[in-house]
Amino acid sequence: MNVVEVSGVGRDYGSGDRVVHALTDVSFEVAKGELVAVRGRSGAGKTTLLNLIGGLDKPDTGTITVAGRKVTGAGEAELLELRRDVIGFVFQSFGLIPILSAAENVSVPMRLARRDPAERDQRVAVLLELVGLGGQAAQRPGELSGGQQQRVAVARALANDPDLLIADEPTGQLDSDTGRAIMDLLRAVVDARGMTALVATHDAALIDRADRVLTLRDGRLV
């Protein structure tokens, strides 16, 4: 079963002589339980591709399907539901809410989904234990190291048990040892939960943890 299906996708920015072909005729599939690394130099189109798959942007050509749901052509309400329930996001900059504790940050997606409070609190505790931060539940992002903040971000991405985890340069702001630990965590989560993950990275040391590697060059899959 394929969780991600991308067919003939293209995305341009600008117009006339200033048009930039961010992606051109990109097609691939990702099966359930696969961890796929997307690599390429800065400007190759990695972030654009992940944003299109995650419904954060719309392609000019082609189609994208995630967990049987068509992303291309979906209305804003459908995309909001997709991003809330089907896809979990991990960003390079962590994206945590500074005034909230680690536990409160992890609970945000479940609050948006109106999960039962008792169930929500129990799941938050389980997820923080999963990422090795059971003892830091009450700490705010500013009191945590970069690696710990990214672990909170991973736990938050898993809050609503998504079919697909999208991680855009999740180790980009971390030292090499911490980055490897985060990638090992992603690998362990995919294996333990049978999830699918797309991870954009240019770090060759991290690519070894992937099942498969997609290489983008100047917006094309090579």
Image (tube, grey):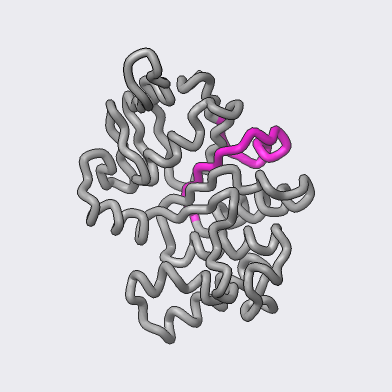
Left or right, 171 with reference to 2 = right
Residue at image point 56% right, 37% down: 37
Q: Identify which residue, 195 or 38, lies in the foreground.
A: 38
Q: Quadrant of the N terminus?
A: top left
x then y, percent, for residue 27: 38, 26
Q: Is residue 68 above or below residue 58?
A: below
Whether residue 32 is visible to the viewer of this picture, yes or no, is yes
x then y, percent, for residue 195: 48, 53
Q: Is residue 40 magenta?
A: no
Left or right, 10 with reference to 192 = left
Residue at image point 73% right, 37% down: 205
- Looking at the rendering, the stretch of residues picked out in magenta corresponds to 194-213
Q: Identify which residue, 168 or 32, lies in the foreground.
A: 168
Residue at image point 51% right, 64% down: 156
Q: Identify which residue, 70 or 98, lies in the foreground.
A: 98
Whether residue 3 is visible to the viewer of this picture, yes or no, is no
Q: Is residue 198 magenta?
A: yes
User: So how many labels did they put on this image?
Assistant: 0
x then y, percent, for residue 40: 58, 27
x then y, percent, for residue 155: 55, 64
Q: Which residue is the extreme one toward the bottom?
A: 118
Left or right, 58 with reference to 143 = left
